Amino acid sequence: MALFISIEGGEGSGKSTVGEHLAQRMRDNQIDFVHTFEPGGTELGAELRRLLFQTREAGREPVSPWSETFLFLADRTHHVETIIRPALARGAVVLCDRYIDSTIAYQAYGRRLDLEKIRRLNQDATDGLLPNLTLFLDVGVEDGLRRAHSEAQDRIGLETIDFHSRVLEGYKRQAMAEPQRIKTIDAAQPIETVVNEAWSLVEPRLISQGHSLR
């Protein structure tokens, strides 16, 4: 049975690592699944990601907040149409690093764009498709950026502490508003603990959809 799971969080929260571990557990249980991500989970998305995340030092013209938003939404529309909906239609589990909550956190809260307009645009871009479960990996801004700074930095990762603090606040407000869908995990814990907690939230959803787990 189909199941749509998204993984959300700020910079350095461990989304990719947790996603990889969950994917491996699904593989071990012989579950039909797709592990994808935004932006960049499609060929078109990879081009949009390059444009979105190029650093200011690259000598490119700046991208305005609304232009940035529409590029993310273009990626999402194509991603939903070509990857997510087809996988769900065949009954697969979709595991997606970032989805609509990222746009609300980063563009509405981080960039201070109109929240209700962003929500409406997300609705239009996805034709109302929501995850069944969203795992919000909550880690403090400074800790997250410290982790992220050990890797190559993109334009958004290099934003100010204030920007990333607003992003984190955006995630927390969404989690409070939708507690049935969005489950918060303390991502400051050791990665093994975070992964086990994430699986404890995913496992009953899989069982309820008829999957037999080892």
Image (cartoon, rainbow, N blue to C red):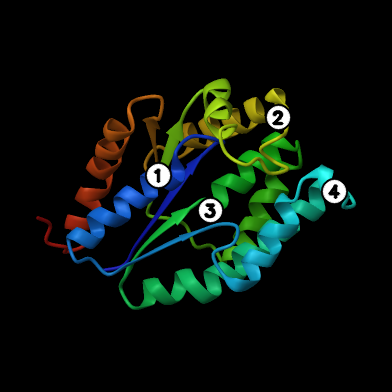
Residue 50, x across and y down, in percent: 70, 58
For badge 3, the amino acid type reads Tyr
141 and 4: which one is in front? 141
Eye-nearest disc, 3 or 1? 1
As measured in the structure, the alpha-carbon distance from the residue carrying label 4 to the one carrying label 1 is 30 Å
Q: Quadrant of residue 141?
A: top right
Q: Which residue is mark 3?
A: 99
Mark closest to the chain's N terminus, 3 or 1: 1
210 and 128: which one is in front? 210
* Label ID, residue 64: 4
Mark closest to the chain's N terminus, 4 or 3: 4
Mark closest to the chain's N terminus, 4 or 2: 4
Give the residue drawn at x 83%, y 43%.
Answer: 57
Estimate how packed mark 4 is, as few (under 14), some (14 to 19) or many (20 or more) residues with alpha carbons within 10 Å. few
For badge 2, the amino acid type reads Phe
5 and 43: which one is in front? 43
Mark closest to the chain's N terminus, 2 or 3: 3
Quadrant location, the N terminus? bottom left
Eye-nearest disc, 4 or 1? 1
Q: Which residue is mark 1?
A: 17
For badge 4, the amino acid type reads Ser
As measured in the structure, the alpha-carbon distance from the residue carrying label 3 to the one carrying label 1 is 17 Å
As measured in the structure, the alpha-carbon distance from the residue carrying label 2 to the one carrying label 1 is 24 Å
Q: Which residue is mark 2?
A: 163
Which SS class for mark 4? Answer: loop
